[in-house]
Image: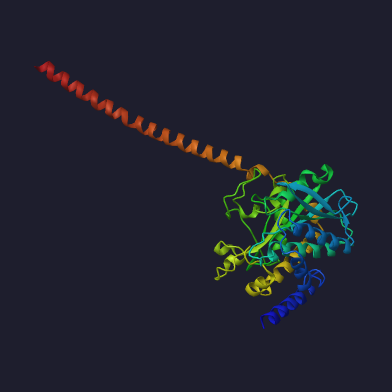
Amino acid sequence: MKKIIAVFLIVFACILTISGSLGFTALSFCEEEINSFVTENGNRTAGSEGEKQSANYIEERLTALNIAPLYESYQQSFEYNDLTSQNVLGLVDNGSTSYVVIGAHYDNIYKLDESVGANDNASGVVTSLNIASNFVSKNLDYNIIFAYFGAEEVGLVGSEYFLNNLDENILKNIILYINLDSIGAGDYLYYYTYDAPTSYGNFIDNYASDYSITKLGSKRLFSNRTTQGINYNHIGLNSDNANFIRRGINSLTFFAGNLDVARLGFHETQDHNKIMHNTDSIETNVEVFGERFYINMATVNNFVTDLMLSESFASEMSVREINPTLLTDWFLKIIAIIFVAVLALGTFLFFKFKGKKQNPNRQLKRSKISVKEQKEIAEK
């Protein structure tokens, strides 16, 4: 019975999204596509044979969509801890000097033989492939790179390698990086741009007001992990977008969860046996979140597609205002040191000033006693 209900919900979600603006197609959204991706290679841990086979799967999908490789081949191999991983990179070339990069990591955390990374991050991969199908034949003012990063779960290694080896003419002309990571499993959808106000962020905020997506502010903490010179205490910086922000590149990232209770994914359920990364399967996602699991992906698909097709998108995104130092550990440490120093100096000056105010009275009292004693001595 549960299986019948699950299939019904999936079909219903597909109908909902197909009726929307450039909604999901059955090819890359419905049960067959996401099930095929996670079933063929449930274990996609960094450097594994399953990760390599998943890269081949994504390459085949890009080829079927007539999306060319960014380089001579689709796959960009790199070494990590004596293992080999790879990025998969496709390009929609519109003859422009500007670029939008849409990224999703495809490796996963595999546990208990049933966690196949359906949410983290098959949801992002499948959604990105569908977005790619929407832009194959569009003649836009910018080129689009579709990037599928390996080795994200072990420290954002794939996206770091991608940026370190990207042609400078492309790197300096990226007008926006869009990151899709764990966008299905959650009561709410969130997006994050940058902590400080920016013109590109304001433009995205205005667009988001028409969608059921919540903007992530600057006061959400996730972990104490700090790597690669950027402050990872912020949940909005806990994915590949952090590497782009660190280079001052405009960034937009999406994820699903429920931050009202400071939890993500399956953490928000009452059943503690269903914790994300332990049972991240299609069956558990549909059981816990129902149609919401697919509708979240559809919402991100439609939002990104509409945003990129908006008339002033390219011009609004072309201005870079991000200051990466605002998010680095050493900057925060310097601010903390300055704060402590100012506080200490203020405390010192306060007590010193207070002491000076009291001293004249004490001296005057001593002086009066001294005169009185002198008179008594004189009378004697």
Q: Position of residue 35 (x, y in %)?
A: 75, 70
Q: Position of residue 229 (x, y in %)?
A: 65, 43
Q: Is residue 364 visible?
A: yes
Q: Is residue 239 left or right of residue 59?
A: left
The N terminus sits in image quarter: bottom right
- The residue sitting at 73% across, 62% down in the picture is 124
The image quadrant of residue 127 is: bottom right
- The residue sitting at 49% across, 38% down in the picture is 340
- The residue sitting at 84% across, 64% down in the picture is 133
Q: Position of residue 31 (x, y in %)?
A: 76, 73
Q: Is residue 249 visible?
A: no
In this rendering, the answer to whether 156 lies above or below 50 is: above
**The furthest residue to the bottom:** 1
In this rendering, the answer to whether 270 lies above or below 253 is: below
In this rendering, the answer to whether 116 lies above or below 375 is: below
Q: Position of residue 64 (x, y in %)?
A: 88, 64
